[in-house]
Image (spheres, grey):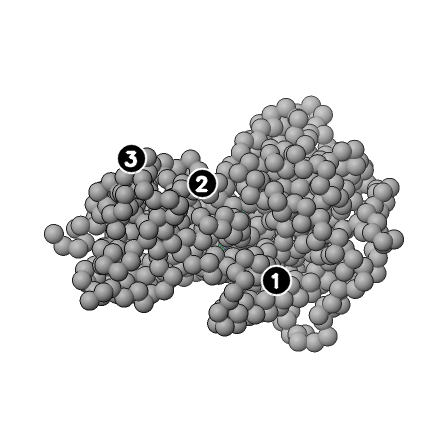
Amino acid sequence: MPQLDHRLRLLRRHARGWAAELRPYALDLDGDPDVVLRLRDATAFHHAARLQIPAAFNPSPLVLAGERFLLTSALERVVFCEEIARGDLGMMLALPGASMSGVLVAAIGDRAQQEWFYGRLLERPTWTFFALTEPDGGTDAAGLRTRATESTDGCGWHLTGRKRYISNALRASMGVVFHRTGDGPLGLGAALVDTTAAGFTATAVPTLGVRGAQLGALHLDAVPITAEQLLGRHLSPMRRGSWGWQRTFNLLRPTVAAMAVGLAQAACDHVREHRRVLRPDERDLLARVAGEIEGVRRLTRRAAVAVDADSGSGHLASAAKLRATRLAIGVTRWALGSFGPGARLDQPLLDKFARDATALEYMEGTGNVQRLAVAAALDRGAFDGYPGVGPTATTGGR
Amino acid sequence: MTVVAHWTRPYDAARSVGVEAALADLYDRVAGGALVAGPAGQALAPGPVGRAAERVWPGGAPLRGLDGATTVALPAPVRDADLAAFRGLPGPDGPGWASYRAWLLGLAWLRLGCSAGLLDRIRTHLAGRRAADGPLLRQQLVQATLAEAVTDQLTVEALLTDADPDADSVADLVQAHHQLTAADHALLPVLGAAGFTGDGPGRAVYLSHLLADVYLPAHCDVRMPA
Ligand SMILES: Cc1cc2nc3c(=O)[nH]c(=O)nc-3n(C[C@H](O)[C@H](O)[C@H](O)COP(=O)(O)OP(=O)(O)OC[C@H]3O[C@@H](n4cnc5c(N)ncnc54)[C@H](O)[C@@H]3O)c2cc1C
């Protein structure tokens, strides 16, 4: 397949139930991103807030039928995220928790930084942000301009710059800010930031889809940070910079692909549920769509297994993200079309799904970025081993 | 007046002012203060028309006597638009389709203007942006996307310029609308997340697609009565 083993099927089954609790609020969240604040009692909310915390810092991990889940592996995250996004992608992106920052902190944070970050998450449901993109460019991450400058008295650092399109920026209480301390690739870094710090301002950036994610623009006006907040000080400049970032993005990419698969599945489910009588040609198309979704789902799981085995191995993840994005966009538009004229007004949930799907193009590297990555991997022979015995989707209870 | 000259205003307004202004112009030209109903009985009208209309175009039915006619909430990202949406109206049928062809033609010009405006904005936006190895506008993947989309726009423009006002089918216009939708879908991602904001160029594109959704028939082969 990779087929899911017993543990992952268990996780999938539970996550599906949690997602079903969120679905009734999907359109409300589209209208008002603060709706998520009123869902604190929802199971997904409460679990998401405490997932992705490694065992060493996690006294009370999620236990389902005697099995422990940390969601620190890409494969577990893929299974979880597909199901929650199948409930609602906007909701998936609006939930509190370690999210993208958690993966970076796990990859390059030192023990004290991890203790601080995970400790805050364990105190109460906490939103985090991950601020890489700047107004002048998101794709060219190495060209970022936000500066961390050391105070003249040597007593700390200041962050100055602007970030844009940052998920959960307004509701987060901490996160990471990517910056540079000097010119060139070795001057790149990331810092843990508390959003109550002086000079930190977040304003809303309204979007056409995934409006629950409540994107924001950050204005960092000499935000004071201590040297202890600079992530990965124990690592070489390369390891805490582009090398570490690349691995983090590789680990995150299958998750975005899984969200796309979940969204495509949601649109397909909607057609099945609301178009009871299908013409033979429509039935045929539905079957093809279902097959297409399954293919991308399997590719996504393979990609997750590959990055779990080697976080430097992101080419399958690029392929999965590329195809999954096209899938979600295509399937949501097909679903709308299958309801005929006027579907956007008559089927507001499907209209929302189609708007949400377009967000996937930009998350975790645009389509062109993935195309270039896949082409480069092809060029260096990274796919030469395929088809072959692929990785299997078992987790061994990590 | 040539076909093109007739539709210059909605095209220009959509290209450089906005979809709401262009739609107001199109409504003035075609429907004379009535709501224009699409094949599913929906209408998307400029706010002032929505508030004052007494009739439904193309059939001319009085709005007041219609049982099932109701307003519909606009989707969240455009709920602040000065537009009104309705459902439960009598859509075009029989002889109405001949007049409806004119509406689809005008709407295609509006949507072409909107798509051309998107390309204008992309060129301006990308002019100031860089990839790691040079200007974004010089990246071949970007250039390929722009070239394909402008070719679609040119095809639609050619078709609309010489559109036969008395044709007995709307197939050519439905095809033109679908081609515009595809061109927009290809173009919008080139803006990056700037095309995804609720107040950026993607908003006009979304409204254009909402109009297409309300007004395009499900099939190309709607035949007008002889
Ligand atoms: C819903 C959503 C959530 C997001 N959340 C976050 C977040 O939490 N944190 C964060 O930091 N960012 C976030 N982003 C921003 C996202 O990461 C960026 O939008 C993305 O990286 C692209 O950057 P950009 O928008 O500046 O586009 P640009 O980089 O300006 O790209 C514009 C276009 O040029 C193309 N392009 C760029 N370089 C090349 C090249 N070399 N060759 C060919 N084509 C190229 C791109 O594919 C794109 O089509 C989010 C965006 C969205 C829509």
Q: Amino acid at mark 1?
A: Ala
The x and y percentages for residue B5 are 16, 51
Please state the chain letter of the residue tagged with numbered disc 2 in the rendered image: B
The reply to whether label 3 and label 1 mark residues of one chain is no
Q: Amino acid at mark 2?
A: Ala
Cβ of disc 3 within 8 Å of ligand 1? no
Q: Does residue A92 appear left or right of residue B164 in this picture?
A: right
Q: State the residue in front, B200 or A144.
A: B200
Would you call the spot at circle 3 few (<14 residues within 10 Å), some (14-19), or many (20 or more)?
Answer: few
Which residue is disc 3 drawn over?
B52
Real-space Cα separation, disc 3 to disc 1, in angstroms: 51 Å
Determine whether label 3 and label 1 are within 8 Å by CB. no
Q: Which label was assigned to residue A320?
A: 1
Q: State the residue in front, B38 or A73.
A: B38
Label tally: 3
The reply to whether label 1 and label 2 mark residues of one chain is no
Q: Residue at x 63, y 66 (%)?
A: A294
Which is more N-terminal, label 2 or label 3? 3
Which residue is disc 2 drawn over?
B73
